[in-house]
Amino acid sequence: MQTAKPMMMREDHLHLHDALDILQPSEHWPGHHHPILLPYQTPLSFPQQMLDTSYSIPEQPELAELVPQLPFGAALEIDAVLTDSSTSTGCFALEHRPRKVARRDVDHGSGTSSLERQDDDHGVSMIALLLECALAISSENMTEANRMLHELTYAASPYSPSCAERVVAYFTKGMASRVINSWTGICAPLIPHDAILSSFETFNNISPFIKFAHFTANQAILEAFHQRDLIHIVDLDIMQGLQWPALLHIFATRAGGPPHLRMTAFGASAAALAEIGKRLSDFARRLGMPFEFRPMAKRPGEVHPSMVSRRKGEGLAVHWLQHTLYDSVGSNSNAMRLIELLRPKVVTLVEQEIGHCGGSFLDRFMGSLHYYCVMFDSLGASIRCDDPSRHKVEHGILGREIENILAVGGPGRSGEQKFESWRAEMARRGFAQVSMSRNAMAQAQLILNLFPSSLGYTILHGDGTVKLGWKETGLYTVSSWTAEPLIV
Amino acid sequence: MQNPQHRAPDAFSLDLDDPTAADKWAAELLRECAKAIADKDSANIHRLMWMLNELASPYGDCEQRLASYFLQALFCKATDSAAHCYRTSLAVAEKTRSFDSARKVILKFQESSPWTTFGHVAANGAIMEAFEGEAKLHIVDISNTFCTQWPTLMEALATRADDTPHLRLTVVATSSGAGAVMEEIGQRMEKFARLMGVPFEFQVVRGLARLEELGGRELLGLREGEAVAVNCVGALRLLRVDERDAFLRTLAALRPRVVTVVEEEADFTSCKGDFVECFDECLRFYGGYFGMLEESFPATSNERLALERECFRGILSVLALDGDDEVAVGDCERREKGRQWCGRLAKAGGFSAAEFSEDVVDDLKALLRRYQAGWSLMPAEGNAAGVYLTWKQEAVVWACAWKPN
């Protein structure tokens, strides 16, 4: 197999996919029903620090240790080893070795210097103050809250080598912002779409979560539409559409010829949608695949269900990657109604494992604190504390989400009830879960293989879903559902 | 808490994704908000603060940071909580301040920008020239420099052609917090003087609730036969406006050889009473300062963050603390421009301006060459004396030397 030269994940990510033209397309694997979605053999180029394992970051106490853990599903780490079999098809075999994750030992013994112990103490006392402040806000004791906010602001810097401090800085900022916005009485957010998309792209570059979500979801969609000729993908929040070129390429180059593919894309910004539509259409045209793109500059919860329909003979997929950057879906019940009426063959859901998103301020605070501690830890493990990309992601993505979660009205920033868990809701409404396949997990592992193996990202598998997490905590969960059994 | 509105108010003209939209969105929104406050237009106050709150961030770009600190100040004003907020902020700052952290910030600032070093070089130059031939020197240092100004001067004294003079340094701690770190600073000064071979005495005049109470010769312990220099860097603005003239008279009574004054170039005094005018000037000055910080430091600089945070109380006191509310105890921040100080020094103090010599001007120009482009020196004109440090053609710092008539 030829290898193309390493490519950067540039803004025009389609260049990368053009390079795929000189790679062999994925092949059917005799004896298996589903083709393996082989991603690029060319290594995607990541910031040098992440590939350079000789660069050592000073040991920081795991921030997540400082925050009480919320229990998640059974953690079973799958160690997927790809071995090159010697068969003539040049295929790959997949070896699973499930094993329990060892209990992480909190070792503050001989290895810890006094400076690290100081950091521990400082970190612990700041988190304690942060919790006190949240309590004060939740009981509307504003005088105390303000005093503590001042202290926290002075004590914590978002550029500190300590992940604890960085998290405290952003949670403090979120609470200070909440104090003002509960006074103004207005909750509707202002959304700088371009800035968000730009930060999101950086997030996609320096951290594996988004790629993980894209590639595993794509695999599930691929498996659902084996040999279908008419395919309709509904993306409930397309962002920059980073996910789709890879899938388009697989469909376009499959044995048996490309399907007719159409895409209905919901998005926040009409201008961004137009640009994405053009790029995807151009790409599909170069691949010789019939392609239709329908932009919907609205939220799925705001359109009448008749606005999106399934044509006769079409295989329909609904995809949604959840985030808390802004309310992408609108009325949850309306959006769910839309999905139900579409009777999709496959629904791929990517959810963040943030607890209690629909609850009270304090519930949301506690639920998100652990999540973001782990997230910040994952960035801090491999990227320098003064790296501008890391700052861009922490400020433009994570900080923004934290602010939305803590804001009056919670992440929805509206009075409507949001589903606590979409997976639970899907099950409740009679969708049948489709277990994520071994191939989907292989995708996840391949993404992780692009990162230095010493890092603590883990793939967790259980209850039919695939999670990508840091150390033992799952952060993003991909699940797949089908309405088909509902069809009478 | 009021019942929150969930719909965005109609008609806000900010298109966040418009590339041609004003770069300086913060200034525009902040000014509108200030005007709404002056007009007591409650609906607009709420709407504009909501927008600012959405867009501001103390960790973002320059516009976002400016918006963040000004929004906090305006919020305190609108909710009548300014005095309390000021006191809280001050208490917290003093609690978290340490010698090490303050020193780090000051040194980093001096490395990255001539904002403070400009005044030091000018003042030291004038002091050295005034002390020519004198054997017993006494510098009364009323400043915020944490003595970073003096090592270079001590070096100059040590390498003076004639016998090394005896130097006394009396530091007047200008804020209640500074007194705590002065012990440590004093020790370092003594150590440095020993190294330089300069006979040296150090004392701190502390616990002065108000600078205005600065007594006379006895309080400072002035001795016969001493040549006295008074160094006021960032100090005169801490005085209550109606007591500035009296203070200058007090300085004159010390019979100094020279008084060096360094101040930031802004006028928050003549607009006192007119909120919108004060606001505009405050925004102009701090907008320039924040912009300068953005260009002088890397984006993830802790020192830059510390310097910006230090601005908050100044902004708050100018915008939200007025008249009798004015926080007492030497924490007034009503700056005046060079031209205005010249008026006071001449009339009330009975001083005349002493031009900086060519040597000093050369030293200043050499200093500026060490930093990035954008900085320059501008001599004062008309009814002002001294020199200005300019950043992108705007005068930002003023330095001047005065002799008694």
Image (tube, coloured by chain):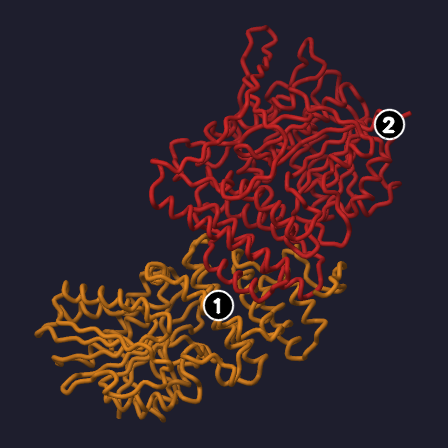
Chain colours: A red, B orange
Q: Secondary structure at mark 1?
A: helix
Of the numbered discs in the image, which one, if any, rests on residue A486? 2
Work out whether A190 lies above or below B26.
above
- Residue positioned 68% across, 40% down in the render: A322
Q: Chain of mark 1?
A: B
Q: Nearer the viewer, mark 2 or mark 1?
A: 1
Callout 2 touching callout 1 (CB < 8 Å): no
Identify residue type, mark 2: Leu
Q: Residue furthest right?
A: A488
Residue of label 1? B89
Q: Secondary structure at mark 2?
A: helix
Of the numbered discs in the image, which one, if any, rests on residue A195? none
Identify residue type, mark 1: Ser
Q: Chain of mark 2?
A: A
Quadrant in which residue A144 is drawn: bottom right
Work out whether B298 lies above or below A480.
below
Work out whether B258 lies above or below A9.
below
- Residue positioned 64% across, 28% down in the render: A466
Task: State the quadrant of the C terminus of chain A.
Answer: top right
